[in-house]
Image (tube, rainbow, N blue to C red):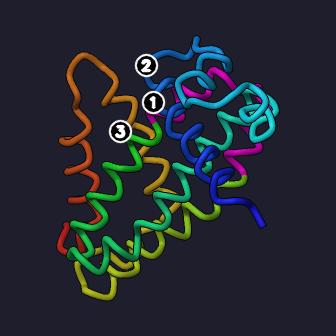
């Protein structure tokens, strides 16, 4: 059983590292330890390498997204839940892109493979809820939807954020009322 202070240290390190990497990809492990208020030994005990820390940040982000699906579906209509979840996904994809520079190609591939299935399952939940309500077309495929979202994070990183307009087009295309 992990002690509560150890869990708190790990959570604080992840939070500080997520913010620090958002500011700059050049931050050192020692700077992260200092900002988190832990010693280097505590940092390296939890995350033996910079890559291990980056992978943990990314995995935490994916877990948060996946866990948000039931909450969104309980609070919002399926199409609005899908819209909100996709906005969150795009934000996470932008962060992942920034974090990706700190990963080796092999680690990047491993984390992508580990998270693909759960992300597809989350999208499937959202699409199926909309299909049951008759607002999302029956042939909507979660893999296609995920691929389309790749264009959204690229559009959001330009001088003019076109992602809200592009998301509206994607969601209009998913509509059960859209012309075929």
Q: Does the magenta stretch mainly form a helix, a strand or a loop?
A: helix
Instruction: From the top left corner, tell me how far across and down residue 49 is, in percent.
Output: 79, 29
Q: Name above or below for residue 27 compared with residue 16.
A: above
What separation in Å lies between label 1 and label 2 (alpha carbons)?
Answer: 6 Å
User: In the figure, is residue 104 to the left or right of 25?
Assistant: right
Task: Please rate how many residues cluster around mark 1, counting C-alpha atoms within 10 Å: few if below 14, some from 14 to 19, many from 20.
Answer: few
The reply, left or right, for residue 72 in relation to residue 50 is left
Q: Give neighbour class at mark 3: few <14, some 14-19, many 20+ (Cα, 10 Å).
A: many
Q: Position of residue 19 (x, y in %)?
A: 45, 30
Sequence-wise first label, 2 or 3: 2
> What residue is pinned by disc 1?
19
When the figure is inspected, residue 165 is found, relative to residue 29, above or below; the finding is below
Does the CB distance between marks 2 and 3 fall below 8 Å? no
Residue 152: mark: 3
The spot of residue 82 in percent (x, y) is: 31, 64
- C-alpha gap between disc 1 and disc 3: 22 Å
What number is the disc on residue 107?
none
Q: Secondary structure at mark 1?
A: helix
Q: Magenta segment, which residues? A: 94-113
Label 3 element class: helix
Front residue (pair 35, 122): 35
Instruction: Give the answer, above or below, for where 16 lies relative to 82.
Output: above
Question: Which residue position holds label 2?
Answer: 23
- Residue at 40% of width from left, 37% of height from top? 151
First in sequence: mark 1 or mark 3?
Answer: 1
For the residues labelled 1 and 2, say whether their Cβ atoms are less than 8 Å apart.
yes
């Amino acid at each position: 059983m992990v002690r509560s202070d150890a869990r708190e240290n790990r959570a604080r390190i992840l939070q500080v590292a997520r913010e620090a990497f958002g500011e700059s990809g050049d931050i050192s492990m020692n700077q992260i330890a200092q900002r988190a208020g832990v010693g280097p030994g505590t940092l390296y005990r939890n995350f033996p390498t910079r890559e291990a820390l980056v992978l943990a940040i990314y995995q935490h982000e994916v877990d948060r997204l996946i866990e948000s699906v039931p909450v969104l579906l309980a609070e919002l209509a399926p199409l609005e839940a899908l819209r909100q979840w996709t906005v969150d996904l795009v934000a996470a994809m932008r962060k992942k892109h920034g974090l990706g520079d700190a990963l080796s190609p092999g680690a990047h591939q491993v984390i992508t493979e580990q998270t693909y299935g759960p992300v597809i399952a989350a999208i499937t939940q959202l699409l199926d809820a909309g299909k049951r309500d008759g607002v999302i077309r029956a042939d909507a495929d979660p893999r296609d939807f995920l691929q389309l979202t790749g264009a959204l994070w690229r559009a959001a990183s330009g001088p003019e954020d076109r992602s809200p307009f592009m998301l509206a087009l994607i969601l209009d295309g998913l509509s059960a009322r859209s012309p075929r």
